[in-house]
Image: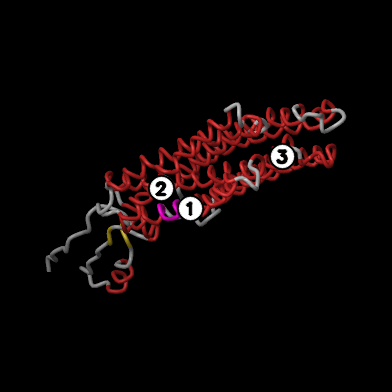
Amino acid sequence: MAVEPLFGTRAQKAFIITMLIEAIVVVTLVALTFGMVRADTGSSFSDLGYKTLPCYLALFILAEIFELIMAFDALRSRNIIQLMGIVLFHGALIVFSALQFHETRVAIFNCQPYCVTDPNNLWNKVQPFLVVAPCIVAASWFFLMFWIKQLYAEFGWVIFHVVGANPKFKSMYQFYQIFICLLKFDFFCFVGVTMQLLIVVLNKQSAEFGITIAAIPVVLLLLAGCARAVKHEVKWLMIISFGLMIAAMAYLYKLDRFYAPASAAQYVSTRATLTVFTVVAFLLLSTSLAIGIKCFRDFDKGLHESKAHGQSYTPVKMQVIDVFGMGGMSERQSSSYFPGGIPLQQQISIE
C-alpha cells in the first residue's frame, strides 16, 4: 500500500478543515461574549467576578490552537493513537464549554454590588452565544469521529512499517505512542490550570503566585526530559522524571483550597473549571506514570531504532539475489525494504 502524502486524501483534508472551521466559529462566539460583557461593565470588568471571561477566552484559544497542532502532528506522523486522543480531548472541550455557561452566569449575577445596572439584560444578550458554543463543538465531534474512522483504515497499517509484524514489538511501540501522547495532554492541562490561577485567582504579591510561576519551567523541563528519555531509552533521566511526576501529584492539594471556607470566595467564579482541570491533570499524570513504567521495562528490548527514527526506520532489509544476471533490476530492488518477516536466504541455481 502506497504512503499517501500529507493531506493527500479526502479524509485528511476533511478532518483538518472540520477542526479549523469549528475553532474559528467557537473562538468568535467566545470573543463576542467577552466583548459584550466588557462593553457593559466598563471599569468594573477588572472585578474578581468578571475575570473568568478573559480566562475562558484565553483557554479556548489555547485549546483550539493545541488541538490543531496535535491534529497536524497526528496526520503528519500517521499516528492513529494520537487521533484517538484528539477525539477524547474534543469531548472534554464539550464539557468545558458547557461549564462556562454556569460560570459566566455566576460571574454576572454574583458580582456584589452589581457591576452592571441590569445583570438580567446582560445575561440575556450573552446566553445565546454560550448555548451555541458547546453545540458547535459537539456537532464537530461527530464529524471528527466519522473522518477518524476512515483515517484508521488509512493509517492502521503504518505500525507494521515501523516495527514489523512482531506482535510483541507492536505492543511495545503502541505503549510508547500512548505515553508520548499523554505527555502532550499533560502539558495542556498544566498550562490550563496555571493560566486560570494566574489570571483569575492569585494575587501578584502572594508567595503562591511566585511558586506557580517558578513551577512552569520545571514542569516543561520534566515533560521534555521525559519524552527524550523514553525515546532514546535514557534510564537515569527516566528515573528522575518519575520522581518529579510523583512530586507533581502533590498539586492535588489545590482542591482543598478551592472549597475551604477561608479561601472559597477567591475561586467562586472558576471553581468548577479549576476542579475539572485539576482532577483531569492528576488522572493524566497518574496514567502517564503507570504507562511510563511499562515503557521503562521495555528498554533494551530492540525497539530503540524504531522509536528514534519513526517511519524513516525499516526493521528488516530485503535481500535480493541476482540469480538471473539482471544486475540493474537487482541493484534497484536491493535498496528497498521489507517491513517485517525473515529475509530471503541465498538460493542455489540449477545451473
Let me know if residue 249 is in the magenta part: no
* Cβ atoms under marks 2 and 1 closer than 8 Å: yes
In the displayed image of the protein, which residue is found farthest to the right?
Answer: 117
Residue 276 x %, y %: 55, 32
Q: Quadrant of residue 337?
A: bottom left
Residue bearing mark 3: 51
Left or right of residue 235: residue 85: right
Measure how far apart labels 2 and 1 are at the Cα level. Answer: 9 Å
Q: Specify which label sits upstream in the sequence, 2 or 1.
A: 1
The three-letter amino acid code for the residue at tag 3 is: Lys
For the question of whether residue 19 can be seen, the reply is: no
Left or right of residue 297: residue 13: right
The three-letter amino acid code for the residue at tag 1 is: Val
Q: Secondary structure at mark 3?
A: helix
Instruction: State the extent of the magenta-drawn residues as a range.
Output: 221-227
* Rendered position, 333 above or below 81: below
Residue bearing mark 2: 244
